[in-house]
Image (cartoon, grey):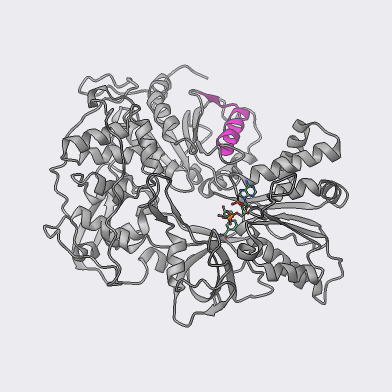
């Protein structure tokens, strides 16, 4: 490898929710401002560069599912796997920024795998891999990693000096506290008095919640450190002076061949009105639609952000509703090659539509958002507070702010002199995500229907805040279905209520095995039971089919609920499978039973698994059973993994470390499959 500096470098991103894309594009933009020559591509566009020649590579990559690569990097990983030469990348230097979450097992697995593979192919790292952790806030790793990247890059890449003579190799971003608050938003209206209603006259519009902050220890702006740089300006909006034709769905949803508008046929509440969580079961009509699936597959729903929230934001920014519905076009700002993918799909659109379907209005604010807001805040005290919150010194108060789970509207009402142009919000807010659900039914049972189940997300922030928060998709679906709450009563919905959906086939192999004689150990507390209903339906019908000459493998289900009378989801169906001999064993852990967890009594599924350890061990080792786990990625998945390791230690006479290694091997061999949800 020569020591000569390279003329340019390439940034690649693999992004599931848009975070990695946003970070990569900001690195790209900043690198240009710092005098580097760079290109930026999504990983699946890897063939836009010649890997056998490119000398400096920067990767920003997140994870999905159980430490799997994001969807838009799968082709790239397939390409990498096929390369066997140990010197293929011996000319190349790389660095990786991984975005992960330590709440999940396999923390930052994709970045680690990528690093190993690049080293195996002869590449060398020019700057340490950064492993950011969403559990403590991505920014605490991402920001310093980027700040120090410039120096590392300057060692391997040519960097032009800026005309200003500023030392562009400095790693600390210099702060400019400019007042852009007088910037008038060309979409702002002088009519700031529009009285808003949300269609239901009796329901008053929520105008956001003021965030509680203790700013007595606020530090002067010139003493603050680690303030993020101003995020890249990506988009430009042009008014077309046309009234927007109101269509029920944005054009990108209406015109995509992947996305199907399906009718909700029926709804059933699976829980008692006094249950801790409310769970709904919905049946969608997919007759005549091209939608083929097998149990284990999931699908996505494109739900809009709540209209009330959108109206609140528009009102706060002084954009009247007529203007918000006008047809506009959104394009890349000057000097920007392309819009972020999630904004690019809005061709002919409106501000209202972009806020409803384009950006995430409810996730925790990035520091960069607070930084951008500070630039458009006229009140000195508010501006200082925003700078403080996104600085290192303000991290404690930022955590306080996070505890209150503020929406962007809450931020705008807390800092009322902050009036950013709508474009800057679109630049900085994360992309709005479709929501994923497991399919509950088997296509053999209901070929024209798609069933799914979900908890209504509705909770209060902790004391002393006590603010009620609602999920985006689940509360929308609850409303569409008329807020039914009578337990296990199926209500047919006559009206034409439709929702846009798209199939998401399971890439991980988490599907019912085709060989019905294979024994299955299924573990799925709460809504984690959803895919197993489909597994059981599918196998029962395969077993009863005339062509079947195989015996039915043993099927065991470990299920968990809080109270058998209130939230035992699909109880009738599951007990039916047991009665008909399809489900050999049904174990139910009742976590809020008076004796749960007392004197060795089980509380959770993993406790029953330990009790049944010997049988589980035999089923796996003597009958080759496959283990399926579905549900919560944070606590349950680890609890179950630990229980399986304990079973192997106790009944397989092995050390804990050997047991954990064996489980990892089974994961790779797909003898142990997990469908984990955050
Ligand atoms: P849940 O109602 O919160 O909990 C179900 C049971 O699990 C309760 O008895 C709960 O007990 C118990 N539990 C709590 N912590 C546990 C732990 N560390 N280990 C084992 N059990 C534990 O469950 P849920 O909200 O339905 O959660 C299931 C997860 O699966 C969610 O993340 C959901 O997103 C996901 N999922 C959803 C779908 C879907 O299509 N909607 C499909 C599959 C999976 P306590 O509360 O008494 O502690």
Furthest toward the bottom, the residue is 494
Furthest toward the left, the residue is 190
Query: Is-magenta flag for residue 84?
Result: no
572 relative to 114, above or below: below
User: Which span is picked out in magenta?
Assistant: 108-125
Predominant SS along the magenta part: helix
Whether residue 640 can be seen here = yes
* Image-quadrant location for residue 233: top left
How far across and how far down the image is residue 475, in percent?
A: 44, 63
Camera-side residue of 672 and 504: 672
Specify whether 214 is left or right of 651.
left
How far across and how far down the image is residue 496, in percent?
A: 44, 79
How many numbered marks are there?
A: 0
Furthest toward the top, the residue is 3
Specify whether 552 is left or right of 339.
right
603 relative to 50, above or below: below
Camera-side residue of 59 and 245: 245
Specify whether 248 is left or right of 538.
left
* Residue depicted at 44% across the width and 81% down the height: 495
* Residue depicted at 36% across the width and 65% down the height: 250
Specify whether 230 is left or right of 636.
left
Query: Is-magenta flag for residue 111?
Result: yes
Camera-side residue of 60 and 210: 210
How far across and how far down the image is residue 493, in percent?
A: 49, 80
């Amino acid at each position: 490898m020569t020591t000569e500096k390279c003329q340019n470098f390439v940034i690649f991103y693999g992004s599931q929710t848009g975070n990695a894309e946003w970070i990569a594009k900001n690195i790209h933009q900043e690198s240009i401002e710092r005098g580097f020559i760079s290109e930026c591509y999504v990983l699946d566009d890897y063939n836009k560069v010649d890997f056998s020649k490119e000398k400096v590579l920067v990767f920003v990559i997140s994870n999905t599912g159980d430490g799997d690569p994001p969807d838009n990097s799968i082709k790239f990983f397939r390409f990498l796997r096929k390369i066997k030469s140990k010197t293929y990348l011996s000319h190349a230097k790389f660095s990786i920024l991984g975005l992960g979450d330590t709440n999940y097992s396999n923390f930052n697995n994709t970045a680690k795998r990528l690093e190993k593979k690049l080293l195996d192919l002869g590449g060398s790292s020019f700057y340490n891999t950064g492993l950011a952790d969403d559990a403590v806030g991505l920014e605490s790793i991402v920001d310093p990693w980027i700040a120090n990247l410039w120096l590392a890059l300057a060692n391997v890449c040519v960097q032009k000096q800026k005309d200003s003579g500023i030392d562009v190799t400095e790693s600390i971003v210099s702060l400019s506290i400019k007042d852009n608050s007088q910037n008038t938003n060309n979409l702002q209206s002088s009519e700031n008095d529009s009285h808003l209603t949300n269609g239901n006259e009796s329901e008053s519009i929520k105008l956001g919640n003021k965030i509680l902050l203790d700013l007595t220890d606020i530090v002067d702006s010139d003493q603050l450190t680690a303030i993020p740089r101003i995020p890249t300006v990506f988009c430009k909006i042009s008014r077309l002076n046309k009234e927007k034709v109101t269509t029920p769905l944005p054009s990108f949803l209406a015109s995509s061949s992947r996305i199907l508008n399906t009718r909700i046929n029926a709804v059933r509440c699976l829980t008692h009105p006094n249950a801790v969580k409310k769970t709904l079961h919905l049946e969608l009509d997919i007759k005549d639609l091209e939608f083929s699936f097998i149990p284990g597959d999931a699908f996505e729903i494109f739900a809009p952000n709540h209209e009330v929230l959108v109206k609140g934001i528009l009102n706060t920014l002084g954009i009247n509703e007529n203007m918000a519905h006008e047809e506009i076009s959104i394009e890349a700002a000057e000097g920007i090659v392309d819009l972020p993918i999630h904004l690019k799909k809005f061709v002919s659109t409106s501000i209202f539509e972009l806020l409803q379907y384009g950006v995430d209005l409810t996730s925790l604010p990035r520091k960069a958002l607070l930084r951008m807001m500070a630039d458009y805040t006229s009140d000195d005290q508010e501006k200082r507070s925003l700078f403080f919150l996104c600085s290192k010194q303000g991290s404690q108060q930022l955590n306080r702010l996070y505890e209150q789970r503020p929406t962007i509207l809450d931020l705008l009402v807390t800092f009322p002199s902050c009036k950013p142009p709508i474009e800057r919000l679109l630049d900085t807010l994360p992309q709005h995500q479709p929501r994923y659900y497991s399919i509950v039914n088997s296509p053999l049972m209901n070929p024209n229907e798609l069933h799914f189940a979900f908890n209504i997300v509705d909770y209060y922030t902790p004391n002393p805040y006590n603010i009620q928060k609602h999920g985006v998709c689940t509360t929308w679906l609850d409303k569409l279905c008329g807020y039914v709450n009578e337990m296990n009563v199926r209500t047919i919905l006559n009206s034409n209520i439709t929702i846009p959906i798209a199939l998401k086939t399971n890439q991980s192999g988490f599907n019912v095995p085709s060989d019905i004689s294979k024994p299955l150990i299924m573990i799925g507390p709460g809504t984690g039971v959803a895919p197993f209903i489909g597994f059981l339906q599918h196998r029962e019908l395969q077993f009863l089919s005339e062509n079947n000459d195989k015996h039915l493998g043993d099927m065991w289900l470990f299920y968990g609920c809080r109270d058998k009378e209130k939230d035992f989801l699909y109880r009738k169906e599951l007990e039916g499978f047991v009665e008909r001999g399809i489900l050999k064993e049904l174990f139910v852990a009742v976590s809020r039973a008076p004796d749960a967890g007392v004197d060795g009594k089980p509380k959770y599924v993993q406790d029953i698994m330990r009790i049944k350890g010997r049988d589980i061990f035999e089923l796996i080792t003597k009958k080759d059973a496959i283990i399926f786990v579905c549900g919560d990625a944070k606590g349950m998945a680890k609890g179950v993994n630990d229980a399986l390791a304990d079973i192997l230690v106790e009944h397989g006479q092995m050390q804990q470390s050997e047991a954990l290694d064996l489980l990892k091997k089974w994961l790779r061999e797909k003898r142990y499959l997990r469908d984990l949800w955050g």
